[in-house]
């Protein structure tokens, strides 16, 4: 049953990605932490669902003060998750099933427990003395904003050992590496080669805008940061063709697009679409698609061979940095009525509870995710509409154990629930008795089957993977519509979404020539014909979505 990985070097443009933290999926030795053996156990589930690539957040040696994004050793597996042999077996198991594996590459900072930092602080003139950004004063780079506004008051922290300040963009236990130092580049390239030699298919470039900081500037997307990414990409294309980079750059449309680089000097193959994401949630609550349509219209084209990574939720807060103040205020009122639901500049809740557990909204949101230009990134548990636990700290609210079966331990682990890295969600609405994989597997109307079926349908329509996107006027602010035209063989797909709580009539213009038959992909039925004025009139039920082919 060994499947071949496709040889297509642009595989990521057609892939469905699935983000899952090792510790959250399945614990096989009963210690309360999900592990790599558990990941292996669940590969068939992911394959069944329709996943093409798995994104693993950091699983390396770490004090786990930032979910593992505080790395103490880049080439050692955290013993809680298993061994290097386990990782190799996981990677081979994924590849055998035709799935790829993308891992997090966290190079902006390390944990303060990393050997480099320990040596840097104790031996300023030694080989690691300049690995971090040290200063006698904390009054440099004052234009640079603070990211973790809830916990940090400065980007500088005092080190008792070295008697100097060090620079950090995230938690103070995460000192930033000094990219002015060429030895840091070498060290980072070594780590990249280590994992690429093992066979990983790509890296998510964590916190990538922040590599360089200079006086008077913002410390975000500074030119040498781009130059560094170009050199990393060039190395990968030369030594490891077919592997990819996806940028985590929470920036405005123009600035995110810069992370793709140009055809001559490519940077990342993909970038997460941070500008579009919050406007999906804005439309879902306001019933008005104007903002979403606007941001889609403003999105610059991506270079040839590149693709957006589209997402609704991930392991972080739903960030509201890309909407304006007024929109942010409304979104806090709508989506974070309890103060505990907020964190930093965002909201720490999962998809289903954000959408009030409403199935119509969940389907609409997921349908947009699968229709927008680029490749979708699903977040583990959202395929069954899992809930969150806002009583947990920080972003742990939406990082609880995966719910496989209805028992209180959710089938996550055979160990003592007291020992779990985080408790299983226990609410009436979202506990494992109400939300679990096993029950949904035997219910054809479940969110799980919806996800599986819709992913399959999407795969049969190549236009939805790599096609171009043209926005259509709809005559109604509640309705978003665009047509995806295939790059190669395939049919154009008209994607239509009604965000209103009421039925709406829409008139789409310039879709296809008069007389063309319009077929609803989901039902196979002819909906109507394009009329004499080349317009398409549609009656759309409240909160509905449609994939239409025109022939
Ligand atoms: C990224 C990660 C986030 C982490 C931060 C610092 O934004 O997604 O989880 O806390 O980087 O590493
Ligand atoms: Ca375990």
Image (spheres, rainbow, N blue to C red):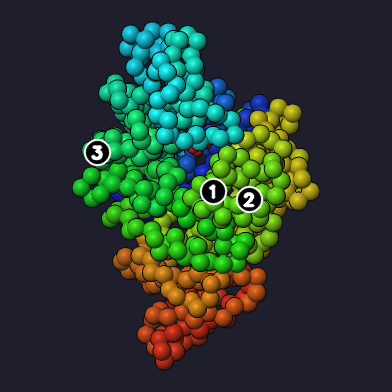
Q: Are marks 3 and 1 in contact (CB under 8 Å)?
A: no
Q: Residue at x 69, y 43 (%)?
A: 339
Position in image of residue 31 (x %, y %)? 66, 26
- Categorize mark 2 by other alpha carbons within 10 Å: few (<14), some (14-19), many (20+): some
Q: Is residue 210 above or below residue 488?
A: above
Specify which label sits upstream in the sequence, 3 or 1.
Answer: 3
Q: Quadrant of the C terminus?
A: bottom left
Give the CA separation, mark 3 to mark 2.
Answer: 42 Å
On whether ligand 1 comes within 8 Å of the CB at mark 1, the answer is: no
- Categorize mark 3 by other alpha carbons within 10 Å: few (<14), some (14-19), many (20+): some
Name the residue that disc number 1 marks. Answer: 320
Q: Are marks 3 and 2 in contact (CB under 8 Å)?
A: no
On whether ligand 1 comes within 8 Å of the CB at mark 3, the answer is: no
- Judged from the image, the secondary structure of the residue bearing numbered disc 2 is helix
Specify which label sits upstream in the sequence, 2 or 1.
Answer: 1
Q: Is residue 349 above or below residue 543?
A: above
Position in image of residue 519 (x %, y %)? 48, 79
- Residue 515 visible at all: no
Depth order, front residue of 438/346: 346
Q: Residue at x 53, y 76 (%)?
A: 476
Residue 234, numbered label: 3
- Judged from the image, the secondary structure of the residue bearing numbered disc 1 is loop
- Residue 124 visible at all: yes
Q: Are marks 2 and 1 in contact (CB under 8 Å)?
A: yes
Name the residue that disc number 2 marks. Answer: 332
Residue projecting furthest to the left: 264
């Amino acid at each position: 049953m060994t499947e071949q990985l496709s040889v297509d070097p642009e595989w990521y443009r057609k892939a469905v990605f699935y983000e899952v933290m090792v510790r959250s999926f399945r614990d096989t030795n009963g210690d309360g932490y999900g592990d790599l053996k558990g990941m292996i156990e669940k590969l068939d589930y992911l394959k069944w669902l329709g996943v093409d690539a798995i994104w693993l957040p950091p699983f390396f040696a770490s004090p786990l003060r930032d979910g593992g994004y505080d790395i103490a050793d880049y080439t050692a597996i955290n013993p809680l998750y298993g061994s290097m042999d386990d990782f190799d077996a996981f990677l081979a198991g994924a590849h055998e099933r035709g799935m790829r594996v993308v891992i997090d590459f966290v190079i902006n900072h390390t944990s303060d427990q990393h050997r480099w930092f320990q040596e840097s602080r104790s031996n300023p003139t030694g080989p690691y003395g300049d690995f971090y950004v040290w200063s006698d004063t904390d009054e440099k780079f004052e234009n640079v904003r603070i990211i973790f506004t809830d916990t940090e008051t400065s980007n500088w922290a005092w080190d008792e050992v070295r008697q100097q300040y060090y620079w950090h963009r995230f938690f103070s236990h995460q000192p930033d590496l000094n990219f002015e130092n060429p030895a840091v580049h070498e060290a980072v390239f070594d780590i990249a080669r280590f994992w690429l030699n093992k066979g990983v298919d790509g890296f998510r470039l964590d916190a990538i805008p922040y590599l360089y900081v200079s006086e008077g500037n913002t410390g975000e997307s500074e030119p040498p940061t781009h130059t560094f990414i170009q050199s990393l990409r060039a190395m990968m294309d030369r030594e490891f063709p077919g592997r990819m980079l996806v940028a985590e750059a929470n920036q405005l449309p123009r600035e995110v697009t810069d992370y793709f680089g140009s055809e001559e000097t490519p940077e990342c193959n993909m970038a997460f679409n941070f500008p579009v994401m919050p406007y999906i949630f804005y439309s879902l609550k306001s019933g008005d698609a104007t903002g979403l349509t606007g941001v889609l219209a403003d999105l610059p084209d991506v270079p040839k061979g590149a693709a957006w990574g589209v997402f609704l939720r991930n392991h972080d807060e739903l960030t509201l940095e890309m909407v304006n103040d007024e929109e942010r205020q409304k979104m806090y009122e709508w989506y974070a009525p309890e103060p505990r639901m907020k964190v930093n500049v965002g909201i720490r809740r999962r998809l289903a509870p954000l959408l009030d557990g409403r199935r119509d909204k969940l389907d609409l949101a997921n349908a947009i995710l699968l229709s927008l230009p680029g490749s979708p990134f699903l977040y583990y548990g959202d395929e069954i509409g899992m809930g969150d636990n806002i009583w947990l700290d920080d972003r742990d609210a939406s990082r609880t154990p995966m719910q496989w079966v209805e028992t209180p331990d959710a089938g996550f682990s055979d160990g003592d629930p007291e020992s779990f890295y985080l408790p299983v969600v226990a609410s009436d609405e979202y506990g494992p008795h109400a939300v679990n994989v096993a029950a949904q597997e035997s219910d054809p109307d479940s969110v799980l089957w919806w996800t599986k079926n819709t992913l399959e349908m999407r795969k049969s329509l190549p236009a939805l993977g790599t096609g171009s996107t043209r926005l259509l006027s709809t005559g109604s602010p509640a309705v978003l519509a665009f047509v995806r035209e295939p790059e190669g063989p395939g049919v154009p797909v008209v994607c239509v979404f009604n965000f209103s709580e009421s039925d709406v009539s829409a008139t789409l213009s310039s879709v296809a020539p008069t007389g063309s038959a319009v077929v609803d992909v989901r039902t196979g039925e002819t909906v109507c014909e394009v009329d004499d004025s080349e317009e398409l009139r549609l009656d759309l039920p409240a909160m509905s979505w449609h994939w239409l082919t025109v022939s």
